[in-house]
Amino acid sequence: MNYLTAFILGIINYALIDNVVLSRFLGLCPFLGVSKKTNTAVGMGTSVIAVITISSALTYVINRFILIPLDLVYMRTIVFILIIAALVQAVEILMKRKLPALYKALGVYLPLITTNCAVLGVAIDSAQKGFGFFDTMVFSVGTAVGFLVSIVLMSGIRERIQYNKIPKAFQGMPIVLLAAGLMAIAFFGFKGVSF
Amino acid sequence: MLIPVLTACGVIVVISILIGVGLCVLSEKFKSSIDPKEEKLRSALGGSNCGGCGYAGCDAYAKAVVYEGADPGLCVAADPKVISEILGVQVEAAGKKVAYVRCHGHCAKAPANYNFDDTEDCRIAYLAPGHGSKKCSFGCSGFGNCAQVCPYDAIRIIDGLAVVDREKCQACGKCVAVCPKHLIDIIPDDAMYVVRCSSLNKGAAVKSACSDGCIGCGLCVRTCPAGAIEVTNNIARIDQSKCIRCGACAEKCPSKIIVKRY
Protein backbone atom coordinates (compact mmCIF):
# COMPACT_ATOMS: atom_id res chain seq x y z
CA MET A 1 0.00 0.00 0.00
CA ASN A 2 1.53 3.26 -1.04
CA TYR A 3 1.55 6.35 1.10
CA LEU A 4 -1.35 8.07 -0.66
CA THR A 5 -3.85 5.28 -0.09
CA ALA A 6 -2.61 4.84 3.45
CA PHE A 7 -3.11 8.55 4.01
CA ILE A 8 -6.65 8.62 2.57
CA LEU A 9 -7.73 5.46 4.38
CA GLY A 10 -6.20 6.76 7.60
CA ILE A 11 -8.06 10.04 7.31
CA ILE A 12 -11.37 8.26 6.72
CA ASN A 13 -10.65 5.91 9.58
CA TYR A 14 -9.84 8.62 12.13
CA ALA A 15 -12.38 11.14 10.86
CA LEU A 16 -15.43 8.93 10.61
CA ILE A 17 -14.97 5.49 12.14
CA ASP A 18 -12.97 6.53 15.18
CA ASN A 19 -14.39 10.03 15.40
CA VAL A 20 -12.64 11.99 18.11
CA VAL A 21 -15.76 13.58 19.57
CA LEU A 22 -18.43 11.03 18.91
CA SER A 23 -16.70 7.77 19.65
CA ARG A 24 -13.70 8.75 21.75
CA PHE A 25 -15.46 11.59 23.58
CA LEU A 26 -12.54 13.99 23.45
CA GLY A 27 -12.89 17.71 22.89
CA LEU A 28 -16.47 17.96 24.09
CA CYS A 29 -16.08 21.45 25.54
CA PRO A 30 -15.56 23.31 22.26
CA PHE A 31 -17.88 20.84 20.55
CA LEU A 32 -20.74 22.06 22.73
CA GLY A 33 -19.49 25.59 23.27
CA VAL A 34 -18.74 26.85 19.77
CA SER A 35 -21.33 24.94 17.77
CA LYS A 36 -24.04 27.58 17.88
CA LYS A 37 -23.30 29.02 14.46
CA THR A 38 -21.94 27.23 11.44
CA ASN A 39 -19.36 29.81 10.49
CA THR A 40 -17.74 30.00 13.91
CA ALA A 41 -17.85 26.21 14.05
CA VAL A 42 -15.96 26.07 10.76
CA GLY A 43 -13.46 28.59 12.13
CA MET A 44 -13.00 26.60 15.31
CA GLY A 45 -12.67 23.34 13.37
CA THR A 46 -10.04 24.75 11.03
CA SER A 47 -8.02 26.32 13.82
CA VAL A 48 -8.16 22.99 15.67
CA ILE A 49 -6.88 21.30 12.51
CA ALA A 50 -3.99 23.76 12.37
CA VAL A 51 -3.18 23.45 16.07
CA ILE A 52 -3.43 19.66 16.16
CA THR A 53 -1.31 19.20 13.05
CA ILE A 54 1.46 21.53 14.14
CA SER A 55 1.38 20.44 17.77
CA SER A 56 1.54 16.74 17.01
CA ALA A 57 4.42 17.28 14.60
CA LEU A 58 6.26 19.26 17.28
CA THR A 59 5.45 16.86 20.07
CA TYR A 60 6.52 13.94 17.90
CA VAL A 61 9.91 15.54 17.39
CA ILE A 62 10.27 16.36 21.07
CA ASN A 63 9.11 12.94 22.17
CA ARG A 64 11.34 11.12 19.71
CA PHE A 65 14.52 13.15 20.06
CA ILE A 66 14.39 14.56 23.57
CA LEU A 67 12.11 12.61 25.88
CA ILE A 68 12.88 9.05 24.76
CA PRO A 69 16.68 9.39 24.60
CA LEU A 70 16.77 11.14 27.97
CA ASP A 71 14.43 8.57 29.49
CA LEU A 72 11.89 11.24 30.37
CA VAL A 73 8.81 9.59 28.91
CA TYR A 74 6.99 10.09 32.21
CA MET A 75 7.23 13.86 31.66
CA ARG A 76 5.23 13.61 28.45
CA THR A 77 2.01 15.19 29.69
CA ILE A 78 3.58 18.25 31.19
CA VAL A 79 5.93 18.86 28.27
CA PHE A 80 3.16 18.38 25.74
CA ILE A 81 0.89 20.75 27.62
CA LEU A 82 3.65 23.35 27.57
CA ILE A 83 4.13 22.98 23.83
CA ILE A 84 0.42 23.08 23.07
CA ALA A 85 -0.20 26.09 25.28
CA ALA A 86 2.64 27.98 23.64
CA LEU A 87 1.39 27.03 20.21
CA VAL A 88 -2.12 28.21 20.93
CA GLN A 89 -0.73 31.49 22.20
CA ALA A 90 1.25 31.85 19.00
CA VAL A 91 -1.80 31.06 16.89
CA GLU A 92 -3.78 33.60 18.91
CA ILE A 93 -1.21 36.33 18.37
CA LEU A 94 -1.05 35.61 14.65
CA MET A 95 -4.79 35.35 14.26
CA LYS A 96 -5.39 38.62 16.09
CA ARG A 97 -3.35 40.31 13.41
CA LYS A 98 -4.22 38.33 10.31
CA LEU A 99 -7.81 37.19 10.88
CA PRO A 100 -9.39 39.63 13.36
CA ALA A 101 -12.92 38.62 12.36
CA LEU A 102 -12.34 34.97 13.18
CA TYR A 103 -10.44 35.96 16.32
CA LYS A 104 -13.45 37.90 17.51
CA ALA A 105 -15.91 35.16 16.58
CA LEU A 106 -13.97 32.51 18.48
CA GLY A 107 -13.54 34.71 21.52
CA VAL A 108 -12.74 32.78 24.64
CA TYR A 109 -12.77 29.43 22.86
CA LEU A 110 -9.48 30.05 21.15
CA PRO A 111 -7.54 29.97 24.43
CA LEU A 112 -9.69 26.99 25.32
CA ILE A 113 -8.00 24.99 22.57
CA THR A 114 -5.08 24.95 24.98
CA THR A 115 -7.01 22.78 27.34
CA ASN A 116 -8.82 20.95 24.59
CA CYS A 117 -8.30 17.30 25.41
CA ALA A 118 -8.52 16.37 21.73
CA VAL A 119 -5.25 18.19 21.07
CA LEU A 120 -3.44 16.67 24.03
CA GLY A 121 -5.16 13.34 23.42
CA VAL A 122 -3.82 13.10 19.88
CA ALA A 123 -0.28 13.97 20.95
CA ILE A 124 -0.24 11.51 23.84
CA ASP A 125 -2.08 8.77 22.01
CA SER A 126 0.29 8.75 19.09
CA ALA A 127 3.29 8.83 21.42
CA GLN A 128 1.93 5.93 23.47
CA LYS A 129 1.08 3.86 20.43
CA GLY A 130 4.62 4.41 19.17
CA PHE A 131 3.53 5.81 15.80
CA GLY A 132 6.17 6.85 13.30
CA PHE A 133 6.13 10.38 11.90
CA PHE A 134 3.88 9.51 8.95
CA ASP A 135 1.39 7.64 11.11
CA THR A 136 1.39 10.48 13.63
CA MET A 137 0.56 12.99 10.94
CA VAL A 138 -2.21 10.82 9.46
CA PHE A 139 -3.60 10.26 12.93
CA SER A 140 -3.57 13.93 13.86
CA VAL A 141 -4.94 15.28 10.58
CA GLY A 142 -7.62 12.58 10.55
CA THR A 143 -8.63 13.32 14.11
CA ALA A 144 -8.76 17.04 13.47
CA VAL A 145 -10.83 16.55 10.33
CA GLY A 146 -13.14 14.35 12.39
CA PHE A 147 -13.49 17.17 14.91
CA LEU A 148 -14.29 19.62 12.11
CA VAL A 149 -16.87 17.25 10.63
CA SER A 150 -18.64 16.64 13.90
CA ILE A 151 -18.65 20.27 15.06
CA VAL A 152 -19.96 21.52 11.70
CA LEU A 153 -22.68 18.87 11.66
CA MET A 154 -23.58 19.78 15.20
CA SER A 155 -23.80 23.48 14.41
CA GLY A 156 -26.08 22.74 11.46
CA ILE A 157 -28.35 20.74 13.73
CA ARG A 158 -28.33 23.46 16.37
CA GLU A 159 -29.20 26.15 13.86
CA ARG A 160 -32.27 24.17 12.92
CA ILE A 161 -33.18 23.25 16.46
CA GLN A 162 -33.69 26.97 17.10
CA TYR A 163 -36.82 26.97 14.99
CA ASN A 164 -38.31 23.91 16.62
CA LYS A 165 -40.75 23.89 19.45
CA ILE A 166 -38.91 22.22 22.29
CA PRO A 167 -40.42 21.30 25.67
CA LYS A 168 -39.25 23.77 28.27
CA ALA A 169 -37.24 21.25 30.25
CA PHE A 170 -35.19 20.39 27.16
CA GLN A 171 -34.44 23.90 25.98
CA GLY A 172 -30.81 24.95 25.76
CA MET A 173 -28.11 22.46 26.62
CA PRO A 174 -30.23 19.32 27.24
CA ILE A 175 -31.53 19.12 23.69
CA VAL A 176 -28.00 19.71 22.39
CA LEU A 177 -26.66 16.84 24.46
CA LEU A 178 -29.48 14.62 23.22
CA ALA A 179 -28.67 15.54 19.64
CA ALA A 180 -24.99 14.81 20.30
CA GLY A 181 -25.94 11.40 21.68
CA LEU A 182 -28.01 10.61 18.60
CA MET A 183 -25.13 11.73 16.39
CA ALA A 184 -22.82 9.40 18.29
CA ILE A 185 -25.21 6.51 17.68
CA ALA A 186 -25.32 7.39 13.98
CA PHE A 187 -21.53 7.48 13.83
CA PHE A 188 -21.44 4.12 15.57
CA GLY A 189 -22.78 2.75 12.27
CA PHE A 190 -19.35 3.39 10.73
CA LYS A 191 -17.88 0.78 13.05
CA GLY A 192 -19.04 -1.83 10.56
CA VAL A 193 -16.73 -0.40 7.91
CA SER A 194 -13.29 -1.94 7.95
CA PHE A 195 -10.39 -1.88 5.60
CA MET B 1 19.46 9.28 41.70
CA LEU B 2 19.75 13.00 41.34
CA ILE B 3 20.74 13.05 37.70
CA PRO B 4 17.34 12.06 36.17
CA VAL B 5 15.64 14.71 38.30
CA LEU B 6 18.11 17.34 37.16
CA THR B 7 17.77 16.36 33.49
CA ALA B 8 13.99 16.56 33.82
CA CYS B 9 14.25 19.99 35.37
CA GLY B 10 16.77 21.06 32.78
CA VAL B 11 14.61 19.93 29.88
CA ILE B 12 11.55 21.74 31.22
CA VAL B 13 13.51 24.89 31.97
CA VAL B 14 15.13 24.95 28.53
CA ILE B 15 11.82 24.33 26.75
CA SER B 16 10.05 26.96 28.86
CA ILE B 17 12.72 29.56 28.22
CA LEU B 18 12.66 28.86 24.49
CA ILE B 19 8.87 29.15 24.45
CA GLY B 20 8.89 32.29 26.55
CA VAL B 21 11.43 34.03 24.37
CA GLY B 22 9.66 32.86 21.22
CA LEU B 23 6.28 34.15 22.37
CA CYS B 24 7.82 37.42 23.49
CA VAL B 25 9.41 37.98 20.11
CA LEU B 26 6.20 37.06 18.32
CA SER B 27 3.96 39.31 20.39
CA GLU B 28 6.45 42.16 20.19
CA LYS B 29 6.51 41.81 16.42
CA PHE B 30 2.74 41.97 16.16
CA LYS B 31 2.22 44.47 18.92
CA SER B 32 1.52 47.39 16.61
CA SER B 33 -1.73 45.73 15.62
CA ILE B 34 -3.35 46.67 18.91
CA ASP B 35 -4.71 50.17 18.81
CA PRO B 36 -3.10 52.14 21.66
CA LYS B 37 -6.39 54.00 21.93
CA GLU B 38 -8.11 50.81 22.99
CA GLU B 39 -5.67 50.24 25.81
CA LYS B 40 -5.95 53.80 27.07
CA LEU B 41 -9.71 53.76 26.80
CA ARG B 42 -9.87 50.48 28.65
CA SER B 43 -7.94 51.92 31.57
CA ALA B 44 -10.13 55.04 31.62
CA LEU B 45 -13.34 53.04 31.94
CA GLY B 46 -14.74 52.06 35.29
CA GLY B 47 -13.31 48.58 35.24
CA SER B 48 -16.00 46.93 37.29
CA ASN B 49 -17.54 45.17 34.26
CA CYS B 50 -20.96 46.28 35.45
CA GLY B 51 -22.53 46.00 32.00
CA GLY B 52 -24.39 49.29 32.29
CA CYS B 53 -23.23 50.30 28.80
CA GLY B 54 -24.94 47.25 27.32
CA TYR B 55 -21.73 45.45 26.36
CA ALA B 56 -20.33 42.27 27.84
CA GLY B 57 -17.74 44.10 29.90
CA CYS B 58 -15.28 46.98 29.90
CA ASP B 59 -12.98 45.20 27.42
CA ALA B 60 -15.80 44.57 24.99
CA TYR B 61 -17.04 48.14 25.29
CA ALA B 62 -13.58 49.63 24.73
CA LYS B 63 -13.23 47.49 21.59
CA ALA B 64 -16.67 48.49 20.38
CA VAL B 65 -15.90 52.17 20.82
CA VAL B 66 -12.56 52.02 19.03
CA TYR B 67 -13.40 49.63 16.19
CA GLU B 68 -17.14 49.77 15.70
CA GLY B 69 -17.85 53.40 16.47
CA ALA B 70 -20.03 52.73 19.48
CA ASP B 71 -21.26 55.71 21.45
CA PRO B 72 -18.32 56.72 23.68
CA GLY B 73 -20.53 58.32 26.32
CA LEU B 74 -22.16 55.17 27.63
CA CYS B 75 -19.83 54.40 30.51
CA VAL B 76 -21.37 55.77 33.65
CA ALA B 77 -18.26 55.35 35.75
CA ALA B 78 -15.77 57.02 33.41
CA ASP B 79 -14.92 60.71 33.31
CA PRO B 80 -16.19 62.05 29.97
CA LYS B 81 -13.34 64.57 29.85
CA VAL B 82 -10.71 61.85 29.96
CA ILE B 83 -12.50 59.88 27.27
CA SER B 84 -12.78 62.93 25.03
CA GLU B 85 -9.04 63.46 25.38
CA ILE B 86 -8.26 59.87 24.41
CA LEU B 87 -10.58 59.76 21.44
CA GLY B 88 -10.04 63.34 20.31
CA VAL B 89 -13.76 63.97 20.03
CA GLN B 90 -16.11 65.79 22.30
CA VAL B 91 -18.01 63.31 24.44
CA GLU B 92 -21.24 64.47 25.93
CA ALA B 93 -21.74 63.29 29.45
CA ALA B 94 -24.70 60.96 29.43
CA GLY B 95 -26.15 62.78 32.44
CA LYS B 96 -25.84 60.87 35.65
CA LYS B 97 -28.61 58.48 36.34
CA VAL B 98 -29.43 56.53 39.45
CA ALA B 99 -31.57 53.61 40.44
CA TYR B 100 -34.64 54.43 42.45
CA VAL B 101 -36.77 52.03 44.47
CA ARG B 102 -40.42 52.84 43.98
CA CYS B 103 -41.52 51.76 47.44
CA HIS B 104 -41.34 53.30 50.85
CA GLY B 105 -43.04 50.57 52.81
CA HIS B 106 -40.51 49.77 55.49
CA CYS B 107 -41.45 47.47 58.32
CA ALA B 108 -43.29 50.05 60.40
CA LYS B 109 -45.40 51.29 57.52
CA ALA B 110 -46.22 48.00 55.84
CA PRO B 111 -46.48 45.40 58.58
CA ALA B 112 -46.22 41.67 57.98
CA ASN B 113 -49.19 39.43 57.41
CA TYR B 114 -47.39 36.30 58.58
CA ASN B 115 -43.93 35.09 59.50
CA PHE B 116 -41.89 34.36 56.42
CA ASP B 117 -39.75 31.41 57.37
CA ASP B 118 -37.97 30.41 54.17
CA THR B 119 -34.64 31.28 52.59
CA GLU B 120 -34.29 35.02 52.68
CA ASP B 121 -34.39 35.69 48.97
CA CYS B 122 -36.68 38.08 47.12
CA ARG B 123 -37.40 35.62 44.33
CA ILE B 124 -38.41 32.92 46.81
CA ALA B 125 -40.51 35.41 48.75
CA TYR B 126 -42.18 36.38 45.48
CA LEU B 127 -43.51 32.82 45.16
CA ALA B 128 -44.95 32.86 48.67
CA PRO B 129 -48.59 33.86 49.29
CA GLY B 130 -49.09 37.59 48.75
CA HIS B 131 -45.63 37.81 47.11
CA GLY B 132 -44.04 37.85 50.54
CA SER B 133 -45.08 38.41 54.09
CA LYS B 134 -45.65 42.16 53.91
CA LYS B 135 -49.27 43.17 53.78
CA CYS B 136 -48.68 45.02 50.53
CA SER B 137 -48.02 42.48 47.81
CA PHE B 138 -46.44 45.07 45.52
CA GLY B 139 -43.87 46.45 47.92
CA CYS B 140 -40.22 45.71 48.53
CA SER B 141 -39.81 42.37 50.29
CA GLY B 142 -36.50 43.56 51.70
CA PHE B 143 -34.32 40.49 51.30
CA GLY B 144 -31.83 42.42 49.29
CA ASN B 145 -31.23 40.55 46.04
CA CYS B 146 -30.61 43.97 44.56
CA ALA B 147 -28.01 44.72 47.21
CA GLN B 148 -26.28 41.41 46.48
CA VAL B 149 -25.97 41.99 42.74
CA CYS B 150 -24.93 45.63 43.02
CA PRO B 151 -21.29 45.83 41.88
CA TYR B 152 -20.89 49.25 43.48
CA ASP B 153 -22.24 48.37 46.92
CA ALA B 154 -24.77 51.16 46.53
CA ILE B 155 -27.89 49.46 47.88
CA ARG B 156 -28.56 48.92 51.55
CA ILE B 157 -31.50 47.18 53.16
CA ILE B 158 -32.69 49.51 55.89
CA ASP B 159 -35.58 48.35 58.01
CA GLY B 160 -36.85 45.89 55.39
CA LEU B 161 -36.56 48.28 52.50
CA ALA B 162 -33.97 48.66 49.76
CA VAL B 163 -32.42 52.12 49.73
CA VAL B 164 -30.12 53.35 46.98
CA ASP B 165 -27.07 55.45 47.79
CA ARG B 166 -27.14 58.21 45.18
CA GLU B 167 -23.43 58.85 45.39
CA LYS B 168 -22.35 55.27 44.83
CA CYS B 169 -24.96 54.21 42.26
CA GLN B 170 -23.76 54.14 38.65
CA ALA B 171 -27.11 53.12 37.13
CA CYS B 172 -25.80 49.90 35.63
CA GLY B 173 -29.26 48.36 35.89
CA LYS B 174 -28.33 45.05 37.53
CA CYS B 175 -30.78 45.62 40.38
CA VAL B 176 -33.53 46.53 37.92
CA ALA B 177 -33.11 43.16 36.26
CA VAL B 178 -33.04 41.14 39.47
CA CYS B 179 -35.99 42.64 41.37
CA PRO B 180 -38.88 40.19 40.99
CA LYS B 181 -41.40 42.93 41.63
CA HIS B 182 -39.87 45.37 39.13
CA LEU B 183 -39.71 48.06 41.77
CA ILE B 184 -36.49 49.66 40.66
CA ASP B 185 -36.33 52.33 37.99
CA ILE B 186 -33.38 54.11 36.46
CA ILE B 187 -34.15 57.81 36.71
CA PRO B 188 -32.10 60.96 36.05
CA ASP B 189 -30.08 61.81 39.12
CA ASP B 190 -31.49 65.32 39.12
CA ALA B 191 -35.10 64.15 39.10
CA MET B 192 -36.57 66.06 41.99
CA TYR B 193 -40.02 64.63 42.59
CA VAL B 194 -40.71 60.92 42.62
CA VAL B 195 -43.55 58.56 43.45
CA ARG B 196 -42.48 56.24 46.24
CA CYS B 197 -45.08 53.54 45.73
CA SER B 198 -45.83 50.84 43.16
CA SER B 199 -49.10 49.42 44.41
CA LEU B 200 -51.64 48.74 41.70
CA ASN B 201 -54.37 48.17 44.28
CA LYS B 202 -57.36 50.46 44.69
CA GLY B 203 -57.42 53.06 47.44
CA ALA B 204 -58.96 51.11 50.31
CA ALA B 205 -56.80 48.04 49.75
CA VAL B 206 -53.68 50.18 49.56
CA LYS B 207 -54.52 51.98 52.77
CA SER B 208 -55.13 48.77 54.69
CA ALA B 209 -51.79 47.33 53.60
CA CYS B 210 -49.46 50.27 54.00
CA SER B 211 -49.65 53.71 55.46
CA ASP B 212 -47.53 55.05 52.62
CA GLY B 213 -49.34 54.04 49.47
CA CYS B 214 -50.64 55.68 46.31
CA ILE B 215 -54.41 55.48 46.25
CA GLY B 216 -54.63 56.65 42.67
CA CYS B 217 -56.84 59.64 43.45
CA GLY B 218 -55.46 61.65 40.55
CA LEU B 219 -55.13 64.90 42.46
CA CYS B 220 -51.53 65.19 41.27
CA VAL B 221 -52.61 64.84 37.64
CA ARG B 222 -55.01 67.72 38.01
CA THR B 223 -52.51 69.82 39.94
CA CYS B 224 -49.51 69.39 37.65
CA PRO B 225 -49.15 72.45 35.44
CA ALA B 226 -46.84 70.64 33.01
CA GLY B 227 -48.98 67.54 32.46
CA ALA B 228 -46.11 65.35 33.54
CA ILE B 229 -48.08 63.02 35.77
CA GLU B 230 -50.55 60.37 34.83
CA VAL B 231 -52.41 57.77 36.84
CA THR B 232 -52.83 54.37 35.25
CA ASN B 233 -53.82 51.21 37.10
CA ASN B 234 -54.24 53.18 40.32
CA ILE B 235 -50.67 54.38 40.46
CA ALA B 236 -49.24 57.79 39.66
CA ARG B 237 -46.22 58.06 37.40
CA ILE B 238 -44.10 61.13 36.78
CA ASP B 239 -42.59 61.68 33.37
CA GLN B 240 -39.23 63.14 34.41
CA SER B 241 -38.59 64.67 31.01
CA LYS B 242 -41.68 66.87 31.41
CA CYS B 243 -41.37 67.65 35.12
CA ILE B 244 -40.69 71.31 35.79
CA ARG B 245 -39.96 70.77 39.49
CA CYS B 246 -42.61 73.09 40.79
CA GLY B 247 -43.49 70.75 43.63
CA ALA B 248 -47.23 71.30 43.42
CA CYS B 249 -47.91 67.56 43.27
CA ALA B 250 -45.93 66.84 46.41
CA GLU B 251 -47.83 69.54 48.22
CA LYS B 252 -51.23 68.28 47.17
CA CYS B 253 -50.71 64.53 47.45
CA PRO B 254 -53.03 63.39 50.26
CA SER B 255 -51.01 60.27 51.03
CA LYS B 256 -47.68 62.08 50.81
CA ILE B 257 -46.23 59.53 48.45
CA ILE B 258 -44.92 62.06 45.97
CA VAL B 259 -41.77 63.29 47.62
CA LYS B 260 -38.91 65.65 47.06
CA ARG B 261 -35.69 63.67 46.76
CA TYR B 262 -33.25 66.34 47.87
Image (spheres, rainbow, N blue to C red):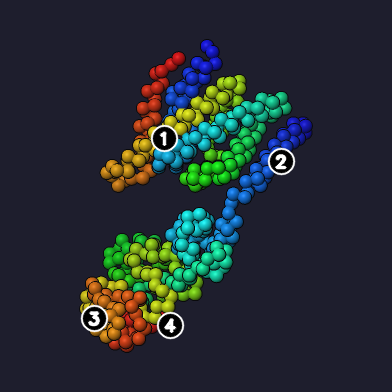
Tell me, yes or no, whether the two marked residues, 1 and 2, touch with CB atoms within 8 Å: no
Residue B183 or residue B86, whichever sits in front? B86
Badge 3 or badge 2: first in the primary sequence: 2
For mark 2, give the secondary structure.
helix
Label 4 sits on residue:
B262
- Name the subunit of mark 3: B
> What residue type is disc 3 on?
Gly
Q: Is residue A39 left or right of residue A79?
A: left
Where residue A51 sits: x, y (%)?
56, 34
**Type of the residue with mark 4:** Tyr
Query: Comparing marks 1 and 2, which lies closer to the viewer?
Result: 1
Q: Which mark is residue A152?
A: 1
Q: Which residue is mark 3?
A: B218
User: Tag 4's secondary structure?
Assistant: loop
- Left or right: A174 as drawn, with respect to A132: left
- Cα distance between the residues tagged 3 and 4: 24 Å
Name the amino acid, label 2: Ile
Chain hosting mark 1: A
**How far across and how far down the image is residue A166, in percent?**
29, 43
- Chain letter behind tag 4: B
Mark 1 surroundings within 10 Å by alpha-carbon count, few (fewer than 14), some (14 through 19), many (20 or more): many
Nearer-the-camera pick, B208 or B217: B217
Disc 3/disc 2 C-alpha distance (Å): 76 Å
Q: Vertical placement of B107 versus A171: above or below?
A: below
Q: Are marks 1 and 2 on the same chain?
A: no
- In the picture, the disc for residue B17 is 2
Q: What residue lies at 46% left-to-right and 72% top-to-bottom?
A: B96
Can you say which quadrant of the picture contains the N terminus of chain B?
A: top right
Secondary structure of the residue carrying numbered label 3: loop
What residue lies at 41% left-to-right and 35% top-to-bottom?
Answer: A152
